[in-house]
Image (cartoon, helix red, strand yellow):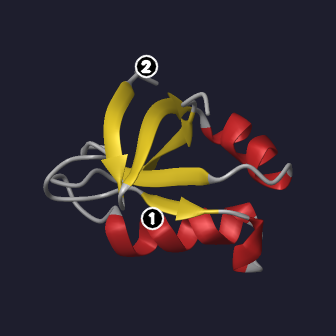
Amino acid sequence: MNKYNFTGTLYGVPVYLTRINKKRARNLFNKGVKIYLCPSNFQPLGPWFNAFDIDLSAGEDFDSLARNFENYNCINNETGYFAAYYINTLKK
């Protein structure tokens, strides 16, 4: 997994996104932290795709949300075949 950090705004909110692995994303999701998903070949704050956020309020477990995201958004060589997971590490 490549280590990436992105700074910018996402839906009008300033963010500093740090890429994490799926195991850590699952653990943080279960603790109530908001996780951002993006196809692996796209930047989460890029012009073609904005990261999609998930948290416990969705009412589903992490694995089903991640699987559904990958089934609809990670479908070819252009997007990549798996999701990249990010957390917002911006200090408030």
For image coordinates 71% across by 38% down, the residue present is: 23
Pointer 2: residues within 10 angstroms few (<14), some, or many (20+)?
A: few
- Residue beneath the point at 34% across and 31% down: 7
List x then y, in percent, for residue 60.
75, 76
Query: Where the C terminus falls, by quadrant?
Result: top right
Q: Position of residue 44 (x, y in %)?
A: 33, 46
Q: Which of pointers 1 and 2 lies earlier in the amino acid sequence?
A: 2
Query: How many numbered discs sit on the rendered protein?
Result: 2
**Quarter holding residue 25:** top right
According to the picture, the residue beneath numbered tag 1 turns out to be 70
- Dot 2 falls on a residue whose secondary structure is loop
Q: Residues within 10 Å of mark 1 (few under 14, many from 20)?
A: many
Can residue 53 be seen here? The reply is yes
Percent from the top left, x then y, of residue 83?
A: 44, 51
Residue at image point 20% right, 47% down: 46
> Mark 1 to mark 2: distance in Å?
20 Å
Q: Are marks 1 and 2 in contact (CB under 8 Å)?
A: no
Classify mark 1: helix, strand or loop.
Answer: helix
Give the residue furthest to the front: 92
- Disc 1 marks a residue whose amino acid type is Glu
In the rendered image, residue 41, in percent from the top left (x then y), is placed at 25, 43
Residue denoted by label 2? 3
Indicate whether 66 appears above or below 40: below
Work out which residue is located at the far right of the displayed protein and give it.
31
Q: Is residue 82 visible?
A: no
